[in-house]
Image (cartoon, helix red, strand yellow):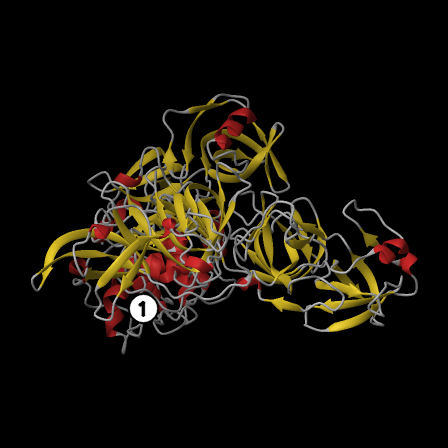
Amino acid sequence: MRKVLSFVLVLTLVLGSFSMAFAADTTAASLTDVDGNANSDAIQVAYDLGIVTGNPDGTFLPEKAVTRAEFAAMITRALAIPDSALAGYTSTSFKDTVGYGWAVPYLAFCQSKGIMLGDGQGNVMPGRTITVNEAMTMALRAIGYTANSSLLVGAWPANYVSIAQNEELYDDVAASTTVDKASAAQIIYNLLTVEKVAVNTDGETVFQDTNLIGSNLGCDEVKDVILGDDYAYDNSLINITSNLGAYGTAYVNDDDELVAFTVKSTALTGKVDGEKFKVDDTKYDLESTVTKSAIFNNGDKLSGYQGILTNAGISTAAAYADGQETVTINVDLSGKKIKDVYSVVAWSANDAQLADSDVQEDIADGNLLGFDFATDDNDNIDMKSFQLKGVTALSDIEEDDVVYVYTDNDDDIRKVAVGTDTVEGVIEEVGDDFITIDGTDYEFPASDLVNTEVIGNFHVDDEGIFYLDADGKVFDFDGTTGKADTYAVVKAGEDETSFDNAKFKLYLSDDSTKTMYLEDSASDIDWTTTTGMDVDAATAAAMTTGQLVGYSLNSDGDIDALDVTSAWKSNVTFQSSKVLIVDGASKSIDSDAVVFTYKNTVSATGDYDVAALSDVEKGAVATGVSQAAIMYNSDGKVIAMFVDESYVDVEDNDVYGVFNDRTRTKTGDDDVYKFTGFIDGASFTKKTDDRDNAFDGRAGVFGVYKITVDANDVITNVQRIDTETDPLGNEASGIVADNVVIGTINSDRTVITDKNDTDNKYTIADDAVVYKYNVDDNEFSVSKLSSLRKDYTVSLYDTKGDDADGIASVVIYFED
């Protein structure tokens, strides 16, 4: 069993007020039917230590009943009795072992050590299902309790039950008369750190200051350890991240490597509230005595110690996590009083987003959201190097799960938190930091990585799917807002020559023209202007052709609410289908926005149409010329537009790429160049048709090129796209944004905000080709949108040539 000390899979298990982490065998096959079982952690530890066994098909069958013979085998293995010693136990005085030859060595060993006594008539009943009381009795006998112990008060089984309860052997054991395999594994797991005893002939019971994990599994015991300080990643064979900063006892091998740890402290996760530390609705008092506490931020121990006198010290620790208020403190707790603080642990997510369809492919490559996992000696992900929250394995992360990634100073992932739940429904109530759906309150994350255009801008009656993070907080939303989403353009009054106070002829988003009636009388309508004031029927009479309006209908089909807040704007740039620049300010476009178009002029009989949002192209006109009517929803997003039909995009099929290298070569007798690089994200090697000066200085130059290739797959021309012009004659239209430092990114990576000018937002196509540029080597490599993160420097390119729409179809990023 000493072999297990070199194994490196970490399994962290919580036992009421203390927990224990083990180094266990990663070479054993994973059990296929224990995920989600209440005892899955204990099962896996016992399995990896060889105490319990699985089946050839990979199953464990956790609900299968355990016989007395099987439990005898488990107890023997937990005592780390080697096969060589068991070889001496070839027979037993028990007379009912016929058919249980495999169990005789275990039964004989347990009989010789007083662990298993039988019925007093010579029978051990090896095939009978063991009861919980029998299993607890055998477990306590295995660590030294004998029948004459002064601590065994009363008759069996009450005398053993009492001690088992005090030693927490019943923790997480199913409340049942008999024992199944899951409970058997849990009982033995609970036993591993219970202190052994020695009982002398007069019944005196002496505690031995050792346990199975120490004496039987060969570990040295080191007390008064702060996990992550005294034993860190580089001298630990177990995963320390889940219990980082905990105070307790370490068990180490001959190389002073941590292989197990018993936690003696209590972890409290919450925030400072006056002179208290608040966890949910419970408040704990802080002692005034000085405590030296280790401070950890995203897995890194900060230099020195922080003197914790009062709550002020913990507030300081929170600042290490970029101002997060919530921290974990590992403490000596007595009731509601914190007597000592051993450490303060803060985590701040480096990135967060909904996982895309390539998430498992990224994990297979050793990264997540653009960050790398630490690797072991075989270049596999080191599973003991990070904490995983919300799922049991990386393989469980699926598309549209909410993923938070936390990295240390070396950019290695130290924590991954995954939210897998969604809520579908209608918002009933909106608070400053929560929404209510179907009677349940859902808070917002305290993170700048959420979709800020959604979080904090909810309204009653917003309906859809709400994506929850690992803490059950609303991270993102996909649905429709409660504000009326029906829009139209006013053509004229009912007779197409004048307006009536109660009747309008509207061109609708379904490409039809209908006459709409106001309910009862105009004075009942809640009409809203840009000033937010109600107006009377005179406003209706004053409305003009081309008014962009929003409306809702009552059950009779009459207009019962009318929004007339649209206005014609002259300085409008259609940057993309997601961002509109209005008077120099970036405005996000709602995904459900309606686009109306007119041909040549706006009139009562004008030629109107409806365009797809994705077809609105980039363009702008001179100041003072009315270009577009704009309407916003309550989130401040553009919800409807009325534009000239000339701003409709057409498709372009040109080829674009980047160059890594250029060498001289020949094609027949002709001197030519050979280029290597990437075209549309795929690697290429192609020759030119000659060695003309047009090809000079291309390789290693930061930028995107339009590449012309003839029928023979020969490059005949290259041209940097920033030398082209857009439809209005503006130069450098190929560059949407150059050397922009990312401030924020929306959840699907398609809109970034300039860190240095937050008014500037830029759109990236969801199928954009992404390159990472290595500044030192002047080389490109293919990457993904999911690799983009805050503080990266990016250049965005629109490769649609004369039909540029301002959406970046090529992205180049690099780290400063």
Res 229 → quadrant: top left
Label 1: state its secondary structure.
Answer: loop
Query: Which image quadrant for residue 544?
Result: bottom right
Q: Classify the position of the C terminus by image quarter.
A: top left
* Residue 686 in picture, x, y percent from top left: 20, 61
Which residue is drawn at the image coordinates 68% and 72% (left, top)? Answer: 510
Is residue 775 visible in the rendered image? The answer is yes
- The residue positioned farthest toward the left in the image shown: 669
Locate the N terminus by quadrant. Answer: bottom left
* Side of 159 relative to 359 (left or right): right
The image shows residue 483 at horizontal and vertical percentages of 72, 58
Residue topped by disc 1:
54
Side of 543 relative to 371 (left or right)? right
* Left or right: 591 in relation to 295: right
Residue 446 is situated, as x and y percent measured from the top left of the image, at 56, 42
What's the residue type where badge 1 is placed?
Answer: Gly
Above or below for 585 versus 662? above
Residue 2 visible at all: no
Mark 1 Cα-neighbour bin, 10 Å: few <14, some 14–19, many ≥20? some
Q: Nearer the viewer, residue 682 or 647?
A: 647
